[in-house]
Image: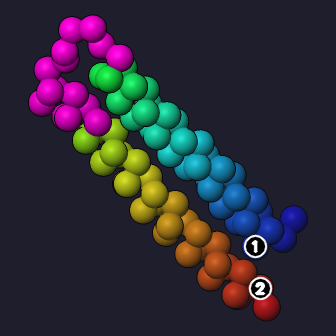
Amino acid sequence: MNMKLTLMKRLDAEERELMQQIQTYEACTMAVLNMASDQIRPLHKFAVEDIVSSLHRMTVELQTELLHLRLEKALCQLLKH
């Protein structure tokens, strides 16, 4: 099999994996926010902020990783032509 084709398949698989991870972190963030607003007893504000901030930070790190991967894919496409 062509090495570039194998590389593109690997990059496509990594892209799908990163997108699924990002969607999971975003879903967890929304779940925490919804849970916080639905509580009968108020939650500790700073603890909730820390949790949501940590989830957001991980989401941003994964989005940056996805951006670099997409750049690598674009450059591979450019080299194919």
Q: Is 20 situated left or right of 50 in this image? A: right
The amino acid beneath tag 2 is: Lys
In front here: 35 or 5? 35
Looking at the image, residue 63 lies above or below residue 52: below
Helix, strand or loop for disc 1: helix
Looking at the image, residue 47 lies above or below residue 56: above
| Stretch in magenta | 38-52
Tell me the residue that label 2 is attached to: 80
Magenta-colored stretch includes residue 48 = yes
In the rendering, at what x and y percent does residue 71 appear?
56, 75
Crowdedness near tag 2: few (<14), some (14–19) or many (≥20) residues, C-alpha within 10 Å: few
**Total marks in image:** 2
Helix, strand or loop for disc 2: helix
Task: Write the residue at 22% across / 28% down.
Answer: 48
Q: Quadrant of the N terminus?
A: bottom right
Tell me the residue that label 1 is attached to: 4
Q: Are marks 1 and 2 in contact (CB under 8 Å)?
A: yes
Task: Write the residue at 73% across / 66% down.
Answer: 8
Between the C-alphas of marks 1 and 2, the distance is 8 Å
Q: Is 76 situated left or right of 49 in this image? A: right
User: Magenta part mainly helix, strand or loop?
Assistant: helix
Crowdedness near tag 1: few (<14), some (14–19) or many (≥20) residues, C-alpha within 10 Å: few
Looking at the image, residue 16 lies above or below residue 47: below
In the rendering, at what x and y percent does residue 35 appear?
36, 20
The amino acid beneath tag 1 is: Lys
Coloration of the structure image: rainbow
